[in-house]
Amino acid sequence: MINEKLRDFYELYERRKSIREFEDRPVELDKLSRLLMTLNRAQSAANRQPWHFIVIEKKDRAKVNELFTKEGFRNAPIIIAACADPSQAWVRKTDGINYAWVDVSIAVTEMIGAATAEGLGTCWIASLDPVKMKEALGIPDNIELVALIAIGYPREELVKEKKMRKSLGEIIHYGKW
Ligand SMILES: Cc1cc2nc3c(=O)[nH]c(=O)nc-3n(C[C@H](O)[C@H](O)[C@H](O)COP(=O)(O)O)c2cc1C
């Protein structure tokens, strides 16, 4: 399955899972460019696209890899840093909520789906020191680091699996809360 393309939407999301260990094998350029196009095509509030993405290859990652505090991710051929620019984002007038992080999260989620369709594994990394990571990546002060996304061929196969999730009854409300 790793080399095949997953085209069925539901099966794709039954197989997607967080991958923290990767094969020592590069991600092909055409696949990477399709992932970047997916980021570029994503929806955003008022179409503001308040985002920047840094593609970090393994060879350029000495500093970033040093900053990870737990096992995993270091052998990912690609890590993408997803950044939000709140000054570019739509702000809801009624309560002043800035949608930059929502928009970046949507783009990243769509890219994760595309990566899964390409037979790639991904992991969203939020557990990091944003100050140190921003410095290592040269991210300007006014830009926020939302996540790092590790991408590569997974060490384990992406198979359909039953995940531990809350029941629908706990989270879905009909009509009102
Ligand atoms: C916003 C967000 C932040 C996450 N941060 C981390 C992280 O820092 N380290 C990690 O190993 N996994 C991280 N994950 C992966 C989650 O632990 C994982 O999605 C969750 O346990 C469900 O497992 P699954 O992705 O395999 O379905 C993160 C996921 C999300 C959506």
Image (tube, rainbow, N blue to C red):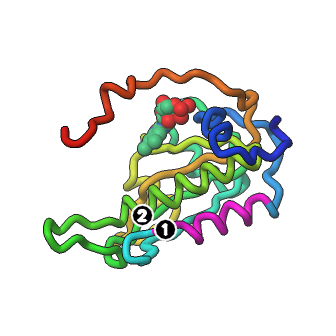
Q: State how far apart marks 1 and 2 are (Cα).
A: 7 Å
Relative to the observer, which residue lies in front, 132 or 118?
Answer: 118
Q: Work out whether 14 lies above or below 26.
A: above
Mark 1 in CB contact with mark 2 (< 8 angstroms): yes
Q: Amino acid at mark 2?
A: Asp
Q: Is residue 112 left or right of residue 134?
A: right
Determine if the magenta segment contains residue 32: yes
Which residue is identified by label 1? 43
What residue appears at the point 23 percent right and 42 percent down from the top-left corner?
175
Q: Give the residues in magenta.
A: 31-43
Amino acid type of the residue tagged 1 in the rendering = Gln
Mark 2, residues whose alpha carbon is within 10 Å: few (<14), some, or many (≥20)? many
What x and y, as percent, mark residue 100?
36, 66
- Quick one: label 1, few (<14), some, or many (20+) residues within 10 Å? some
Residue at position x 17%, y 68% in the image: 96
Q: Is residue 20 visible?
A: no
**What secondary structure is marked by label 1?**
loop
Mark 1 or 2: in front is 1
